[in-house]
Image (cartoon, rainbow, N blue to C red):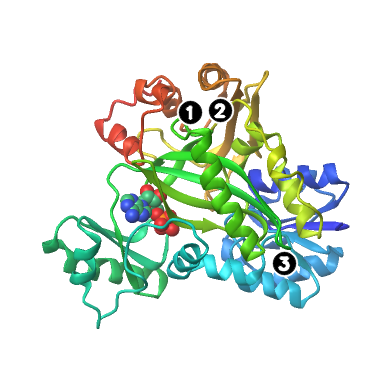
């Protein structure tokens, strides 16, 4: 096992990793920018090192500064959290070159899954169902129209280097294809420095269903069921739940086993999420995230497995926490990502939290790094915290979520709490009847009844 872990992150995820380390008896090193000197992860860690000025590229993304922090403190492993360097294959390699452990997958797997075309090819080869589309990039010499006609309109043009929904354009009909190709390619070129694009069948009203997996790097892997993250705004997840209201135990077992088998074949190491769009009973792979995800607590609440603990153990060469048969989905969990934003315009609202009262009671969990008097800096994401609620059934979970949201107080800044208070009372949400465009359509109607 590791002796000392450096946590190369900030905010709630730095705290989450720190908690797992404490329970494992591992010493912790926090790193922080000058803007985060008063942050909770800095206060709770055994040691802390300032690694640079506020801008992430000079601090949390500053690899030489992180290496120096490891050297000064004698840390033997680095946990990257999510975002920042968590899916940077080169960072994983550089750590290895310095005899430091990266708590995450093998660099080759991060690299493969980070390239959308390669990821899709790999998924297909491993038997994971993918969205019908072009077999690779669509270049100048290819007959894009012929490929698109074969897929069937509407088609989606996607950037190979894409991320965050950028470089993506829908072509509803043949007449729209050429413009969609050039717009997506130009957008991708300016955003990612790589204009290569590929084609996919456009799904009209799919759900976003993702499978949590965990591998030991030696050919052992299990799945921990799915999360339904269909409620999104601008491709950002807003509300996540598990199990999905529309996936049967048989469908879960089938897609879960397909994913676990693929991970066994790859000899995948650590936690990962295989993301699908789901429509008319079919799963279509869209991408794999090779890191711990924001919404991992949903799975923890319904399986009772500490994913960060397991992630650290397997990174140190340990075994999986249990066998597939021992995983039982118990009850229902919902996570709300509460942001420091105006609940109607979504304009960021950094600043000082004057009053803070987190809800409590049975089945209520808050993963947050804020406190009364804390100043949310303007430099990073706007997450105030995640409210995760568990209930024996989805109905009980919704009831509990309603009262927890009503109990929560965050004053001094604007937050998206009123949006969640409205969502939890919406008939479609209560019925579990929504898809990936539902939230944007609901917001466009302008009746969030924010209260
Ligand atoms: P990114 O890496 O840019 O986030 P993804 O491939 O994960 O790109 O897709 C982002 C989102 O775009 C998905 O969550 C989904 O909402 C939508 N999307 C992606 N592929 C399709 C598709 N083939 N049909 C319809 N919507 C899609």
Nearer to us in this view, 340 or 179: 179
Q: Residue at x 64, y 24 (%)?
A: 364
Nearer to us in this view, 422 or 330: 330
- Seen in the picture, residue 146 relative to 322 is either above or below; the reply is below
Lower sequence index among marks 2 and 1: 2
Q: Which residue is tagged 2?
A: 410
Looking at the image, can residue 43 be seen? no
Point out the image quarter for the C terminus: top left
Q: CA distance from mark 2 to mark 1?
A: 9 Å
Q: Is mark 2 within 8 Å of ligand 1?
A: no
- Seen in the picture, residue 439 relative to 202 is either above or below; the reply is above
Q: Picture coordinates of residue 232 (x, y %)?
A: 40, 41
Q: Which residue is tagged 1?
A: 417
Q: Which residue is tagged 3?
A: 66
Q: Residue furthest bottom?
A: 141
Q: Residue furthest left?
A: 175
Q: Picture coordinates of residue 93 (x, y %)?
A: 68, 74
- Seen in the picture, residue 239 relative to 275 is either above or below; the reply is above
Crowd rating for badge 1 (residues with CA inside 10 Å; few <14, some 14–19, many 20+): many
Q: Residue at x 71, y 34 (%)?
A: 304
The answer to whether mark 2 and mark 1 are in CB contact below 8 A is yes
Q: CA distance from mark 3 to mark 1?
A: 35 Å
As helix, strand or loop, the secondary structure at mark 3 comes to helix
Crowd rating for badge 2 (residues with CA inside 10 Å; few <14, some 14–19, many 20+): some
């Amino acid at each position: 096992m590791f002796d000392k872990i450096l946590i190369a992150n900030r905010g709630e995820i730095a705290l989450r990793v720190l908690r797992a380390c404490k329970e494992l008896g591992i010493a912790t090193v926090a790193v922080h920018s000058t803007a985060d000197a008063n942050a909770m992860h800095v206060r709770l860690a055994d040691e802390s090192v300032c690694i640079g000025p506020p801008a992430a590229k000079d601090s949390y993304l500053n690899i030489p500064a992180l290496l120096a922090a490891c050297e000064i403190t004698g840390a033997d492993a680095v946990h990257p959290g999510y975002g920042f360097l968590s899916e940077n294959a080169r960072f994983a390699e550089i750590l290895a070159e310095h005899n430091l452990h990266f708590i995450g997958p093998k660099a080759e797997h991060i690299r493969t899954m980070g390239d959308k075309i390669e990821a899709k090819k790999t998924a297909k080869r491993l038997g994971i169902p993918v969205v019908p589309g072009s077999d690779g990039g669509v270049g100048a010499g290819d007959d894009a129209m012929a490929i698109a006609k074969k897929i069937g309109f509407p088609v989606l043009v996607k950037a190979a280097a894409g991320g965050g929904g950028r470089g993506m354009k829908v072509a509803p009909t043949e007449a729209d294809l050429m413009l969609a190709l050039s717009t997506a390619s130009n957008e991708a070129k300016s955003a990612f420095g790589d204009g290569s694009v590929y084609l996919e069948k456009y799904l009209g009203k799919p759900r976003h269903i993702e499978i949590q997996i965990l591998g030991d790097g030696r050919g052992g892997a299990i799945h921990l069921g799915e999360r339904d993250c269909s409620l999104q705004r601008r491709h950002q997840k807003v509300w996540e739940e598990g199990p999905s209201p529309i996936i049967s135990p048989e469908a879960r077992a089938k897609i879960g086993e397909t994913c676990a088998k693929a991970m066994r074949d790859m000899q995948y190491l650590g936690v990962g999420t295989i993301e699908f769009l789901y429509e008319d009973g079919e799963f279509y792979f869209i991408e794999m995230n090779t890191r711990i995800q924001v919404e991992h607590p949903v799975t923890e609440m319904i399986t009772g497995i500490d994913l960060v603990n397991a992630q650290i153990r397997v990174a140190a060469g340990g075994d999986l926490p249990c066998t597939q048969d021992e995983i039982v989905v118990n009850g229902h969990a919902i996570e709300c990502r509460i942001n420091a934003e105006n609940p109607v315009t979504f304009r960021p609202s950094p600043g000082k939290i004057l009053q803070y009262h987190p809800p409590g009671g049975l089945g209520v969990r808050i993963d947050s790094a804020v406190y009364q008097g804390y100043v949310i800096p303007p430099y990073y994401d706007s997450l105030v915290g995640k409210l995760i609620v568990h209930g024996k059934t989805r109905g009980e979970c919704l009831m509990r979520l309603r009262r927890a949201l009503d109990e929560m107080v965050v004053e001094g800044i604007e937050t998206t709490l009123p949006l969640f208070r409205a969502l939890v009372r919406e008939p479609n949400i209560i019925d579990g009847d929504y898809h990936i465009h539902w939230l944007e359509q609901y917001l466009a109607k302008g009746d969030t009844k924010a209260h």
